[in-house]
Image: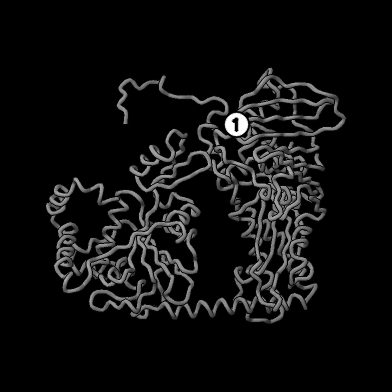
């Protein structure tokens, strides 16, 4: 840290215009990777779709000109080109594309609902593009304004006469931000355009792609017009019509919310395989104001509740007692469903709007769908009964699996239930299963979202565990958390330890990549060494290796576990390149996808197996040395630890590498 005694107001940096976006793109679009640059055309397309939803546009064109350049146009009203009242000499068009938090969507009199309002907007797209050209047809003429990396080039130019209105935006990915390898994937843009079409009923979206970018294996055409007069119902029918459907007629509809605040559209069917069993092709896609909410949210919750409760009510009316056991998981395992809400004031978790959080929308959606769904079932009792029997069978299978798992996972002490904090895995048997012992409830929550539920169990611990080497047997016997661990692992402890009774194949200690995390890991290793050394000798105990930093240069991101690794990266692979560095404060600060990729997915993670000298005659001396060393380092006398550190200080680097 630099010691600057002359620190003053002159040291405070004020970033102007779009400079913050270029300096820290991750704050606005989540990073500089492929997902981030594919978010840019969504922002421009959302603006065009908002014109269509408001009733001012009927046709939108998405044109992928080359791998880095895309053009999106609409036949709406055209962006205003007159001077903005608070910025004389600057057109509204220039303000929208060069100023953050500008636009016509903050006023519900201009747009009743909007997909672009809570996004990063046209200004951020402009800031992260090497070139942007906006052409507006309005007031009887064409008007053109050009930008380069967020800076306006020249003035608004008045062009040829125009009889129609609309807006065309062409932009090119900036290699300085995304790297030279950045390129749009035609399939992603194609699907994006198609999704916007079925979410905006009655609007035609034309897809045009440079033929050189389309290959046969992509399964898409170089040009196609998407048009769905009945919106999501048309698309779902098209997607499932050639598959066995338990509901021959889709259940679909559209209902307005109270107080003219928006509306919901939906479509759902149930798929089976050729033998009438549950299909693996089910999905639930949700949207808000045409924005894909891939992490779901309150609209999904209301939808699932209405559909599940409606079927259970039907079962009650026909005196089918088994229907009481149905849960949403049974109903939606084989369901193919789309729900799309439009709302005046949506609230999202995250700048890129992947989860809807308005609590009132759950109530609105549930109320809107409940009555039509129950009427749908009552109008066709034969189909409704077939659906009820189908879902009842899935519920019964789920209950049988759970019962078998509960029996298989009972501990030697015959505990009927595991600790409430344990999120157990579902696989029957030990092979391939893993128990992650996680530092803290926050990290435990993230790990539960990141795990493979079939084979990975999560047990969060609260703070630092008891040091078993420096405390009495009485304190150990009274320690709830450590005794719960013994019960969860299932093999007993001390002389009663039996490796054949293990409930998991791997026990993985997962703590933060900092000093406190290392301390907790040391305490846990000491516990296992003292209470169940057979676990270690059998090769069942592991340490996870979570990253401390994420370093990004261009389109390439690398996770590193220490300051030394980061320095090596700066002076090696990323030398001379602009690097964006994110430091993880702890496991709980990571996104579930990041935790999965770096620390939990067997395909990409790193594990350290904890080992001990072998318990043989030849290894007896080494075993005694190990016990003495651990006793001294983890015991009550700090002078032993001090002496060890003093004597081995020169080896510290090697020890931790």
Residue 179 spot, x, y in % from top left: 55, 37
Residue at image location 66% in from the left, 20% down from the top: 87
Q: Quadrant of residue 391?
A: bottom right
Report the residue that reaches farthest toward the right.
163
- Which element is circle 1 on? helix
Q: Is residue 168 visible?
A: yes
- Compared across the picture, whether 537 is left or right of 409 comes to left
253 relative to 4, above or below = below
26 relative to 506, above or below = above
The crowd level at tag 1 (other Cα within 10 Å; few <14, some 14-19, many 20+) is: many
Q: Which residue is mark 1?
A: 127
Residue 325 spot, x, y in % from top left: 59, 76
Q: Quadrant of residue 528?
A: bottom left
User: Toward the viewer: 299 or 549?
Assistant: 549
Q: Is residue 258 visible?
A: no
260 relative to 377, above or below = above
- Compared across the picture, whether 387 is left or right of 150 comes to right
Report the residue that reaches farthest toward the top.
89
Residue 262 spot, x, y in % from top left: 72, 49
User: Toward the viewer: 53 or 48?
Assistant: 48
């Amino acid at each position: 840290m630099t010691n600057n005694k002359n620190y003053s107001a002159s040291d405070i940096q004020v970033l102007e215009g779009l400079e913050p976006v270029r300096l820290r793109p991750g704050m606005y679009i989540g990073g500089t990777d492929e997902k981030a640059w594919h978010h840019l055309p969504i922002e421009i397309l959302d603006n065009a779709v908002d014109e269509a939803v408001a009733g001012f546009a009927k046709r939108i064109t998405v044109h992928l000109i080359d791998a880095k350049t895309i053009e999106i146009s609409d036949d709406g009203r055209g962006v205003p080109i007159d001077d903005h009242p608070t910025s004389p000499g600057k057109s509204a068009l220039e303000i929208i594309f060069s100023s953050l938090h500008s636009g016509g969507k903050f006023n519900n009199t201009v747009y009743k609902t909007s997909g672009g309002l809570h996004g990063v907007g046209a200004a951020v797209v402009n800031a992260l593009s090497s070139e942007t050209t906006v052409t507006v047809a309005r007031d009887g003429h064409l008007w053109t304004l050009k930008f380069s990396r967020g800076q306006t080039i020249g003035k608004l130019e008045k062009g040829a006469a125009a009889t129609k209105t609309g807006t065309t935006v062409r932009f090119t990915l900036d290699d300085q931000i995304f790297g030279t390898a950045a390129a749009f994937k035609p399939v992603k843009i194609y699907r994006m355009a198609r999704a916007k079409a079925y979410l905006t009923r009655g609007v035609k979206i034309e897809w045009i792609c440079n033929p050189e970018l389309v290959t046969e294996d992509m399964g898409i055409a170089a040009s196609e017009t998407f048009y769905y007069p009945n919106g999501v119902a048309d698309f779902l029918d098209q997607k499932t019509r050639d598959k066995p459907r338990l509901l021959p007629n889709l259940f679909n509809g559209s209902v307005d919310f109270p107080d003219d605040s928006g509306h919901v559209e939906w479509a759902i069917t149930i798929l089976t395989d050729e033998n009438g069993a549950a299909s693996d092709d089910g999905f639930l896609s949700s949207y808000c104001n045409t924005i894909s909410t891939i992490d779901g949210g309150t609209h999904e919750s209301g939808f699932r509740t209405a559909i599940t409760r409606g079927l259970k009510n039907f079962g009650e009316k026909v005196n089918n007692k088994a229907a009481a056991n149905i849960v949403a998981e049974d109903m939606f395992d084989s369901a193919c469903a789309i729900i799309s809400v439009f709302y005046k004031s949506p609230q999202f978790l995250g700048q890129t709007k992947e989860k809807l959080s308005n609590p009132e929308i759950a109530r609105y959606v549930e109320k809107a769908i409940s009555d039509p769904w129950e009427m749908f079932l009552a109008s066709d009792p034969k189909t409704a009964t077939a659906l009820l029997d189908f879902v009842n069978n899935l519920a019964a299978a789920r209950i049988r699996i759970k019962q078998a798992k509960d029996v298989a996972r009972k501990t030697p002490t015959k505990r009927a239930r595991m600790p409430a904090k344990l999120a157990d895995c579902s696989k029957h048997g030990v092979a391939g299963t893993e128990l992650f012992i996680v530092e803290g409830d926050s990290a435990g929550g993230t790990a539960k979202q990141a795990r493979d539920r079939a084979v990975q169990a999560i047990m969060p611990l609260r703070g630092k565990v008891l040091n078993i080497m420096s405390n009495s047997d009485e304190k150990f016997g009274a320690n709830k958390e450590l005794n719960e661990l013994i019960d969860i692992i299932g093999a007993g402890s001390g002389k009663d330890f039996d490796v054949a009774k293990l409930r998991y194949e791997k026990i993985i200690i997962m703590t933060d990549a900092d000093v406190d995390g290392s301390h907790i890991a040391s305490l846990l290793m000491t516990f296992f060494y003292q209470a169940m050394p057979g676990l270690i000798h059998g090769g069942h105990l592991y340490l996870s290796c979570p990253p401390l930093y994420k370093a990004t240069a261009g389109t390439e991101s690398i996770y590193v576990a220490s300051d030394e690794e980061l320095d090596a990266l700066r002076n090696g692979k990323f030398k001379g390149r602009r690097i964006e560095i994110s430091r993880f404060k702890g496991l709980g600060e990571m996104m579930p996808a990041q935790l999965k990729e770096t620390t939990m997915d067997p395909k990409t993670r790193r594990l350290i197996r904890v080992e001990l000298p072998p318990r043989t005659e030849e290894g007896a001396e080494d075993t005694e040395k190990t016990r003495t060393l651990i006793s001294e380092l983890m015991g009550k006398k700090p002078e032993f630890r001090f002496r060890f550190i003093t004597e081995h200080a020169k080896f510290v680097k090697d020890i931790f590498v």
